[in-house]
Amino acid sequence: MERKMGLLLLAAAFSAAVFTRMAAASTAVPAIYAFGDSLTDVGNNNFLPGNQAKANFPPYGIDVPRSRPTGRFSSGYNGVDFVAKKLKFNKSPPAYLSISNDAQAYRGVNFASGGSGIFDATGQNFSISLNQQIKYFKGITRRLRTRICGGTADRFLSRSLFFLFTGANDLFTQQQLFIGQLTGQYRNQLETLYDLGARKFAVFGSSLIGCIPILRVSVPGGKCVEDLNDLAQQFNKATDRFTDIVSACCGSGRLNAESECRSNSTYCSNRGKYFFWDR
C-alpha cells in the first residue's frame, strides 16, 4: 500500500519552529490522531447544528476540572484522554472543529463525533461519519506535505498514533448490513489512513452493546439483548474495576435509562464504579 508522495519544498523557518520542537518533545509518539464516536469525541459535536447528540451541558463533565461540560459524552475524561496522558502529552488532542489553524493539528487532532459510525448512513443527520473524519485528516496531511521537504512528513505520520473507537452505532442502526459489509468498509477506511501515512494503530472494537441500559429497560427482566451481543466483542479487561455494569449513572427511571441525561437529571455519587455514564 506504500505510495510515493511528491513533496514540495518548505521554508526552513517552518521546519525549525515546528518539527524540530516536536522531535525534541518527551512524548512517546509525535502526535495522536483520534477517530470514532461518542466514546472518543472531545467536543466536535458542540460545533454541529441542531440539538441531537450533544453533551455540552451539566452534568456531563462533572468530574473534569471546574466540573464543566466539554462535549465529552461522559462525566469526565474518555479513553483517548487517558492514552494521551499515558504517552506524556500535556493535553489531549483538540477537537478538529475547534482548531483555528493547521499548526494546532501537528501534535494531533481528535476527529471523533458522537453518534457516528463506519457507515455514512449512521448518524448522518447529527454527526460526522468516519469517512468524513478521514477526509478532514486527508486535508491536514495534504497541507502538511506542502510545508515539509523530503520524507519528513512520512516519517512524522508513521511515528504518530492513530486511535480508532467506532462501530457500536452501526450495530444499532445497520444490523442487516453489518455482517456482509461493515468489516469490509472498515478495512477500506483503515487502508485509506495507511495510504495517508498512518502506521501505528490502536483499534478498539465494540463492548457488549446489547447490555446498555436503554436496551435493557425495554426487555422483560432487564435482560441483555443477546442478538446484539453476538455481534459485539467481550468487554475489555478494564471493566473489572466497575461494580455496576447494568445501570446508567446519569438519567432517571429504571436502570436510569427511561430518560436521557439532562441538566436536571439525578446522577450517582460513586461515578467511578459505573461502567455506563448515560443510557
Image (spheres, rainbow, N blue to C red):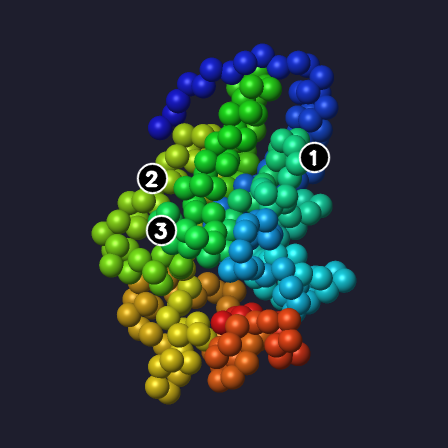
Between label 2 and label 3, give the one nearer the viewer.
3
Residue 257 is left or right of residue 78, and the answer is: left
| Distance from the alpha carbon under mark 2 to that under mark 3 | 17 Å
Image coordinates of residue 230 in percent, x first then y, are 30, 66
Instruction: Give the mark nearer the N terminus: 2 vs 3.
Output: 3
Q: Where is residue 210 in the image (x, y as percent from the top left)?
A: 37, 70
Q: Is mark 1 on a helix, strand or loop?
A: loop
Q: Mark 3 points at which residue?
A: 121
Q: Mark 1 points at which residue?
A: 25
Provide residue 153's location: percent of width, then percent of height: 55, 24
Marks 3 and 1 sit apart, C-alpha to C-alpha, by 40 Å
Q: Between disc 3 and disc 1, whose residue precedes? A: 1
The type of residue carrying mark 3 is Ala
Q: Residue at x 30, y 49 (%)?
A: 183
Q: What element carries label 2?
A: helix
Q: Is residue 216 above or below residue 3?
A: below
